[in-house]
Amino acid sequence: MAKFVKMSMVFVVVLLKSAAAQTVHVVGDSMGWDVPNNGDTNAFNTWAATKQFVVGDILTFNFAPNSHDVQQVPKASYDACTSSNPIGALITTGPANVTLDSAGDHYYICTIGRHCQFGQKLSISVSATPGASPSPTPPTTTTPPTTPSPNSGTPEDCTPAPTSGPTASSPGGSTTPPGSTSTPGSSSPAVSVGVLVPTMAVVMGFFF
């Protein structure tokens, strides 16, 4: 039962994320799906240039019934303003919602009279996923300064000075005198593992 509830919650979260990602685009905004009244035959494409269209988004065409329609067409028909080779059914009742179900270029026209020739046509590019936001610029790393070379080139200047005292440094850089042992409180991996294993055993005992 608990497993079923968990799967149901995951399913609901996925649905909520999908719904949140969906965007409704009102074609032309306040202009609506109409013949541009300013004679701008590229008005709808100018509107589309400011938008991002993703699979799952919805186009809303606002128009009065019997005054306009919406037909999706291939590019050749879009360029020629003809309804030949239509894609899908002709939409004659507005407002109409069209769900973008595939990525790529989509073309829509109004087939009534010369509305398409007068600019009632729309071309958009649909992406499969939303565009990624620009990644932040990585921080600039500072190159550590190099040790300057000796000014003199004689072998005597490059010879290391002898270490004073009864003990010398070991090759690995340790200063522990020979014969001495590490203290019990050291942070060596062996000590850490020795403490961690019994602790995990006790914790696991509470669950099993």
Image: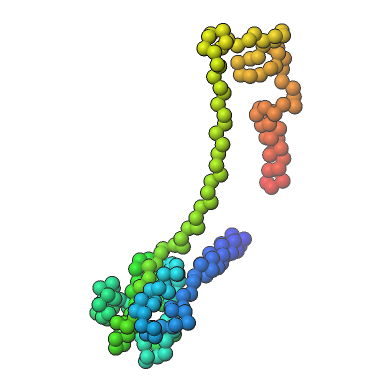
Residue in front for this viewpoint, 24 or 155: 155
Residue at image point 56% right, 44% down: 139
Question: What is the x, y in percent for residue 83?
Answer: 27, 81
Quadrant of residue 35 in the image? bottom left
Q: Residue furthest front?
A: 151
**Nearer-the-camera pick, 177 or 195:** 177
Q: Position of residue 117 (x, y in %)?
A: 29, 82
Judge left or right: residue 58 versus residue 190: left
Q: How many marks?
A: 0
Q: Would residue 28 be visible to someone looking at this image?
A: yes
Image quarter of residue 89:
bottom left
Query: Is residue 184 depicted above or below 121 in this figure?
Result: above
Which residue: 35% across, 66% down? 104
* Quadrant occupied by the N terminus: bottom right
- Does residue 71 appear in the picture of this structure? no
Percent of width and height locating residue 202? 72, 40
What residue do we see at 29% from left, 88% from top? 113
Q: Nearer the viewer, residue 55 or 108?
A: 108
Q: Is residue 179 above or below residue 192?
A: above
Compare residues 154 and 17 and report the one nearer the observer: 154
Describe residue 59's horizontal placement relative to residue 161 as left or right.
Answer: left
Question: Which residue is rendered at x = 57% and y = 31% of the image?
Answer: 144
Q: How is the image coloured?
A: rainbow
In the rendering, at what x and y percent does residue 58 appear? 45, 74
Question: Considering only vertical position in the picture, is 176 above or below 55?
Answer: above
